[in-house]
Image: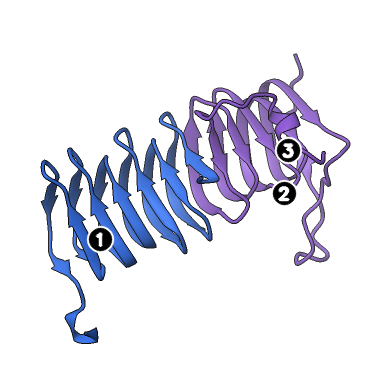
Amino acid sequence: MANTVIGSSIVIDGEISGDEDLVVQGTVKGKISLKESLYVESSGVVEADIETQNVEVSGKVTGNINASDKVELKTDCRVIGDIKAPRILIADGASFKGNVDMDMKER
Amino acid sequence: MANPKDISGSASGDNTVIGPSIVINGKLTGDEDLTVRGRLEGELSLTKTLIVEPSGIVKANVSVKNAVVSGAVVGNVDAAESIELTDGGRHSLAAGHPGRRRELSGSHRHG
C-alpha cells in the first residue's frame, strides 16, 4: 500500500510532490502533484490544487483537481473546485460544487 | 541500518511517513511522530519525535521533542528532549549536491 501517510494531527503548508501514493488524514494546504494516487481520508482536509493520476476523496477538498486517470468522490466527502479527469465517479451522498471536464475532444 | 523499521521501533500504521520519492516544500507542524524517508524542505515543528531515516533529507529549521537522525539534516535542530545521531547514517547531503557542506548546528539541548 501507500508509503506516505500524512497523519491526522499533521498540518502541511506548502508543496508536496512525488512518485508514490499519498494518504492524507491531516491537513494539506498549497499544492499536491503526484504520479500515483492521492487518498484523502475522512479526517483529511486538502486546500490545494491537485495534479495526480488518481484521486479518491472521502474527506474535504477545496481546490482544483486534475487527474490523468480517475477521480472518485466517496460518500460524505465535500469537494469544492473544478475536476478534470477522463473518468469521474461521484457516490451517493457526496457533496460537490464545481465544474466537470472529461476532455471529450480526445474521443 | 539495513532495515529501516528498526529505527522507528514501532509498526504502528498511524504515524506519519514521508516516503522516499516524496518532496515537501513548506511548513509542517504536528502532534505525532514523523518518519522522513524522502525530502522535506522549509520548516518543521512537532511535539513528538522526528525520525530521519537513511534515505531521508531534511533541509529545515527543526523544532521537535526528540530527533533520531540517520539521514541528512541541514539546518538548526531544536529538540526539547533529545537528539540522537546514529552511526549508520550519512550526515551529509547525497550526491547531486556536491560541495554542499553538512551543517548540524544550533541549540542542541539534551535531557
Q: Is residue A67 left or right of residue B41?
A: left
For the residues beneath circles 1 and 2, the answer to whether they share a chain is no
* Chain of the residue displaying label 1: A
Disc 2 target residue? B55
In the picture of the structure, the residue carrying the numbered disc 1 is A64
Tags 1 and 2 touching, CB below 8 Å:
no
Quadrant of the snapshot with the C terminus of chain B: top right
Residue in the picture at 81% in, 66% down: B98
Left or right? Give the position of B28 relative to B36: left
User: Relative to residue B27, is residue A84 drawn left or right?
Assistant: left
Front disc: 1 or 3: 3
Q: What colour denotes chain A?
A: blue
User: In this view, which residue lies farthest toward the right?
Assistant: B87
Can you say which quadrant of the picture contains the N terminus of chain B? top right
Q: Residues within 10 Å of mark 3 (few under 14, many from 20)?
A: some
User: At label 1, which amino acid type do we have?
Assistant: Asn
Q: Residue at x 33, y 55 (%)?
A: A55
Seen at 55% across and 43% down, the residue is B43
Up/down of B85 relative to A46, above or below: above
Residue position for label 3? B4
